[in-house]
Image: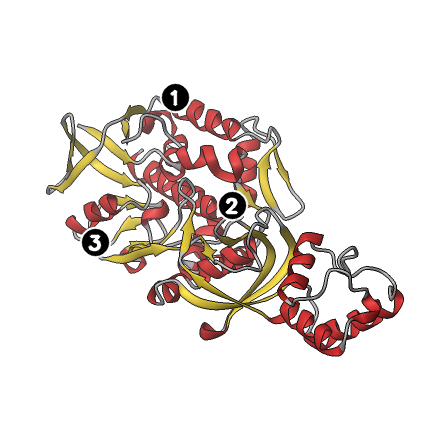
Amino acid sequence: MKKIAIIGGGAAGYFTATNLGKELGKQTVLFEQASLPLQKVRVSGGGRCNVTHACFDPNELVEFYPRGKKELLSVFHKFQPGDTMEWFESRKVPLKIEDDNRIFPVSNSSLSIIECLLKEVDKNQVETRFGETVLSIQKKEKSFVINTKSDYYEFEKVIFTPGSSIKSMDLMKNIGHKIVKPVPSLFTFNIKDERLKDLMGISFEWAEISIPQLKMESEGPMLITHWGLSGPGILRLSAWGALELNKLNYEFQICINFIQQELEESIEFLNEFKIENAKKSIYKINPFSFPKRFWNRILEVQKIPQDLTFSHLNKNQIQNISKELTEGIYNVKGKSTFKDEFVTAGGVDLKEINFKTMESKVVPNLFIAGEILNIDAITGGFNFQACWSEAFLISEHLKSSLL
C-alpha cells in the first residue's frame, strides 16, 4: 500500500505533487482520466497560460473571489502570487507582469509552465496513471480503497483535485460531503439585437454594465461576439451574479454605458462637436473612441439619414443618440460558456474543509483542492492562484506529518 493518491491531473493536483519532495513523491500515485494532464493550463490565456495576477496583498487578493473570500484569506497569507512567481522563476521559468497585472511566462507559451510541472513531478518520482478514471473511493478504518476502470488500489491518504465535473462531485457526495449545486460562473451574454448584428470583433476599451433587476454593476473592456457580448466587464458580472442569474434562467436586461459619460455630459459633448464639425457628414466622422462601425450602427438604428451633416442634427436626435450610448438597454436571453476554461460556482461545501491544511472535516486523511471546492474567481489568473496556494498547503502539511 502506497501512502498518497492524487486524483486529478490539473493545476492543483500537479502542484501538490511537485511540492511533495522525493521521499513522499515515490510513495505517491497520480490518477488522471484524460490521456494528457494539465488541460486547462494548456489552454489558459489563449494558450499562453495566465499563471496568476500581480496582487500581492492577501486582503486585496480575496476581493476577486465571489465565493471563497473569507476562507482563502489565511491560505493566501501562506502562499500568494509573489510566492508563485518565485516558485516558477527559481525553476528557470521567467514570468512577466502585463499592463493589466496578469502574469504570463515570458515565452508566451503554456508549455513552459506544463514542462516545468512535469519535470518536477518526474524528479519526485511520482507514479502517473493517465487514462485511468476513478470510479469510487471507499473509506476504511485506516485507509482508502480506490476503484478505477482497470484495478483496485489502497492508500493511506487521498488528495482530491479532479476539477468540477458532476461525476467528481458525486464521488464526494458518496463519501459523505455536502455539495453546493454547481452553476456556471464565467460566461458571456447571449443577445440578439440589431444594434450588435454583424459587428462581431468590435471591442470597447471600457464600458459600464449593470443589471438593474439585481442592482449589480461592473466595468471593464467589452467585446461584441457572434452570440452577444463578452470581455472582462461582462465576465465579472457573470461571476458575481452567478447564482442570481441562474435563478433568472439567464433572461434579464442589462444597461450599458459605452462612453464613460453621463447622459447630460454626452448631450453637451455632441452639441459642441456639432458646432465644431457643422459641415461634416455625420456618418463619416465618429466623435468617440470606439470603432466607427458601431457609431454608424447607432445612427442607423436612430434612422438618421445617410446624407446628414452634423449641423442638421436636432435636439431629439442628439438626446436619443446620447441615451443609446450612455443608457442602452439590451435583453439577455441565455449564456455561452468557455468549454475548455469552464469555471463553476458550487462544489464541496467550504464549511467542511480545514483551510489550514485543506483536509476534510468529514473524512480524515482526505484533502480537497481546486475547482471541486465551492470557490471561484473572475478571469485574470485568480482561479489558478487558488489552486497553487491550496496545493502548497497540502504538500507542506503532508511533509510535516509524514516525514
Residue at the spot of label 3: 177
Front disc: 3 or 2 = 2
State the SS at label 2. loop
Q: Earlier in the sequence, mark 3 or mark 1?
A: 1
Label 3 vs label 2: CA separation?
28 Å
Residue in front for this viewpoint, 118 or 191? 191
Q: Please name the amino acid that badge 1 sits on.
A: Asp
Please name the residue that numbered disc 1 is placed on.
122
Residue under pointer 2: 381
Image coordinates for residue 382, horizontal then vertical, percent:
49, 49
Of the numbered discs in the image, which one, if any, rests on residue 332?
none
Task: Describe residue 299's horizontal placement relative to residue 161 as left or right.
Answer: right
> Label 1: few (<14), some or many (≥20) within 10 Å?
some
Q: Is residue 27 above or below residue 174?
A: above
x, y percent for residue 123? 41, 21
Give coordinates of residue 69: x percent, y percent: 44, 60
- Residue visible at 69% across and 73% down in the picture: 262
Q: In whole angstroms, how far apart are the C-alphas of marks 3 and 1?
A: 32 Å
Tag 3: amino acid: His
* Label 1 secondary element: helix
Amino acid on which the number 2 mark rests in the picture: Gly
Q: Is residue 322 left or right of residue 340?
A: right
Whichever of labels 3 and 2 marks the residue nearer the N terminus, that label is 3
